[in-house]
Image (tube, grey):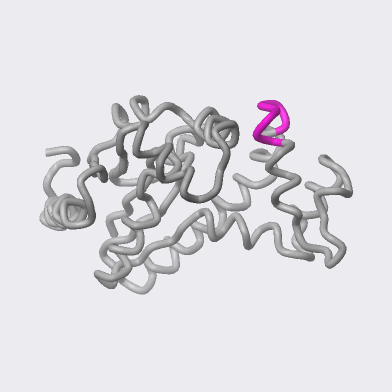
Amino acid sequence: MIVLGLTGGVGMGKSTCAQLLRQRSMCVVDTDDLARVVVEPGQPALGEIRNKFGAETIRPDGSLERSVLAQIVFSNAAARKELEGILHPRIRELWYQQIQSWRREGQTLATVVIPLLFETGAQRELDATICVACSTATQFERLSARGWTPEEIQQRISAQWSIEEKLAKANFVIWTEAGLDLHVLQLDRILSAVSSHRAPGS
């Protein structure tokens, strides 16, 4: 089974690309979804977060208070690293288990969506990587439309490698600036190349 990694800058089109892959009946696991699973009430990670970052990170109903935790970790690089140390190993184990399950089923192609793919070294466990990207101006426009402040946008961007670094390491690139039709065209060309066992990036 060929396993692809999908990454890109925040707001640059990863979710759209993942949706297009699912529409093609492809196996897709998104680590953002897994990140929510590992902090559900009763999960060990949630207790570790409470112990590390304080009771204010937990809502009265026992669930994670995401806005409070985000304020803590995106304004403090050391705190963010501590949170990553709690979450990343658990998330990695879950997507690895999913890949192994698909492999046993005889699936031929799967994709893991990982925002911090290169930052965590996950590319070493993947057959090829795809990076979705757009201009900085478009990125800010998209994130502003989510209701994020300029400060929040900059904090999120600073928490990742620059898009230039991601693009330099990726085997394939999808430029999402020009709209969905071109996004689809680029994705289908990549899938065709991968499916025909052409060398990554060729």
Q: Position of residue 36 (x, y in %)?
A: 62, 59
Question: Quadrant of the rendered structure where residue 80 is?
Answer: top right
Range shown magenta: 73-79
Look at the picture and state if 117 lies above or below 104: above
Identify which residue, 8 or 111, lies in the foreground. Answer: 8
Identify which residue, 143 or 8, lies in the foreground. Answer: 143
Q: Is residue 44 left or right of residue 145?
A: right
The image shows a total of numbered marks equal to 0
Identify which residue, 198 or 100, lies in the foreground. Answer: 198
**139 in magenta:** no
Q: In percent of the image, x 12 and y 51: which residue is there?
A: 193
Q: Is residue 45 left or right of residue 127?
A: right
Q: Is residue 88 left or right of residue 41?
A: left
Identify which residue, 17 or 112, lies in the foreground. Answer: 17
Look at the picture and state if 151 lies above or below 23: above
Q: In percent of the image, x 37 and y 44: which residue is there?
A: 12
Q: Quadrant of the N terminus?
A: bottom left
Q: Quadrant of the C terminus?
A: top left
